[in-house]
């Protein structure tokens, strides 16, 4: 049965793609065998991440940029990790409305992932879904995540080009710095250019970028867009292509892919260890007792970890 699913998947059947993604998200037992088939088929797509504060206009912007890629006959997959933010009401429907133009294009596959299991703004299954879209043959895979908090760094672990979307609204720049967004940006977008303050804000951002230490040979461009009225979208598209060319010719792509590989292995180890530990007899009560002793300073966290690991022979 699963052979025919994979066959249909490889023949470009959209329903098979949707089914494979659902299995990757929900069926732990099928997931591993599916991934062993999909993994060797993936690695060709250009992976682009869009991240930024809630409501910055990421979905609206992605919809615009998807249209540009489509005009160039590129097939596109979009993964939106739904933030369930007050801005969107956090529903799949929200993204459906904002991604109207691409919704009925058979060469655009959009998947909203409502369930956010990790704190990073990335759902645990996101890397697998990207692998599926890539293996399916999507030439461009776009990932939308909300960038708040420290762990936005994760998006660079799964995409080759990171676009950070900000708005001239007050507080965004401070939030961006706090969340480490400036560090991960390959391209900075000041969206809502139709609003006041975009010019000053962009100039400020440029200054901050130029003052940055440890800069490589790529100075992230600051692009002004209005996803609402469509200005700056072609410029953004051009910058994305420029970054991709830079990654290819400078050898950076290889380095980033290696880092992605390492991050993937680390995630898999975490997963395996968590699985092994969950098999420990009375795991919860052991953890409870040890946590108490650690909190009471009766035991170091490391010694507690050793006790737990010794139960599984590690
Ligand atoms: N004025 C103006 N409004 C915009 C622009 N782009 C998006 N918006 C509006 O901003 C709101 C949020 O847009 P989204 O595209 O949902 O933003 P988002 O970053 O995807 O939001 P989350 O996924 O909730 O983090 C919507 O009401 C959009 O219509 C723009 O360029 N100008
Ligand atoms: Mg969105």
Image (spheres, rainbow, N blue to C red):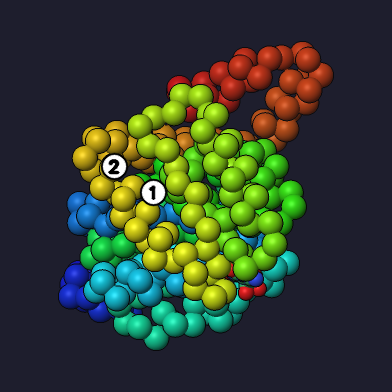
Q: State which tag comes first along the sequence, 1 or 2.
A: 1
CA distance separating discs 1 and 2: 9 Å
Q: In the picture provided, is 42 more to the left or to the right than 298?
A: left
Q: Which residue is mark 1?
A: 161
Is 307 located above or below residue 190 in the figure?
A: above
Residue lying at 67% horizontally and 30% vertically, measured from the top left: 286
Is 166 located above or below residue 11 in the figure?
A: above
Q: Quadrant of residue 173?
A: top right
Q: In the picture provided, is 39 more to the left or to the right than 145?
A: left
Q: Are marks 1 and 2 in contact (CB under 8 Å)?
A: yes
Viewer-side residue, 188 vs 128: 188
Q: Is residue 195 visible?
A: yes
- Disc 1 element: strand
Q: Residues within 10 Å of mark 1 (few under 14, many from 20)?
A: many
Q: Which residue is mark 2?
A: 247
- Disc 2 element: helix
Residue lying at 60% horizontally and 76% vertically, measured from the top left: 94
């Amino acid at each position: 049965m699963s052979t025919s699913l994979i066959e249909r998947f490889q023949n470009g059947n959209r329903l098979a793609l949707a089914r494979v993604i659902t299995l990757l998200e929900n069926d732990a037992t099928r997931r591993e065998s599916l991934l062993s088939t999909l993994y060797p088929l993936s690695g060709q797509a250009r992976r682009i991440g869009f991240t930024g504060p809630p409501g910055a206009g990421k979905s609206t912007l992605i919809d615009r940029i998807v249209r540009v890629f489509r005009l160039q006959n590129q097939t596109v997959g979009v993964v939106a990790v739904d933030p369930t933010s007050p801005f969107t009401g956090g529903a799949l429907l929200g993204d459906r409305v904002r991604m109207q133009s691409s919704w009925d294009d058979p060469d655009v596959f959009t998947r909203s992932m409502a369930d956010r299991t990790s704190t990073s703004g990335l759902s645990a299954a996101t890397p697998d879904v990207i692998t599926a879209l890539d293996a399916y043959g999507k030439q461009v895979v776009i990932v939308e995540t909300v960038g708040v908090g420290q762990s936005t760094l994760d998006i660079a672990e799964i995409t080759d080009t990171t676009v950070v979307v900000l708005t001239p609204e007050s507080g965004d720049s401070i939030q961006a710095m706090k969340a480490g967004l400036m560090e991960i940006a390959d391209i900075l977008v000041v969206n809502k250019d139709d609003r006041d303050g975009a010019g000053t804000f962009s100039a400020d951002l440029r200054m901050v970028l130029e003052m940055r230490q440890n800069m490589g040979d790529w100075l992230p461009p600051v692009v002004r867009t209005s996803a609402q009225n469509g200005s700056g979208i072609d410029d953004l598209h051009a910058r994305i292509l420029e970054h991709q060319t830079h990654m290819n010719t400078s050898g950076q792509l290889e380095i980033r892919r290696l880092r992605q590989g390492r991050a993937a292995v680390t995630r898999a180890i975490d997963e395996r260890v968590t699985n092994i530990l969950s098999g420990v007899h009375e795991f919860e009560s052991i953890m409870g007792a040890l946590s108490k002793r650690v909190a009471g300073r009766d035991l170091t966290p490391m010694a507690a970890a050793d006790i737990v690991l010794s139960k599984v022979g590690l």
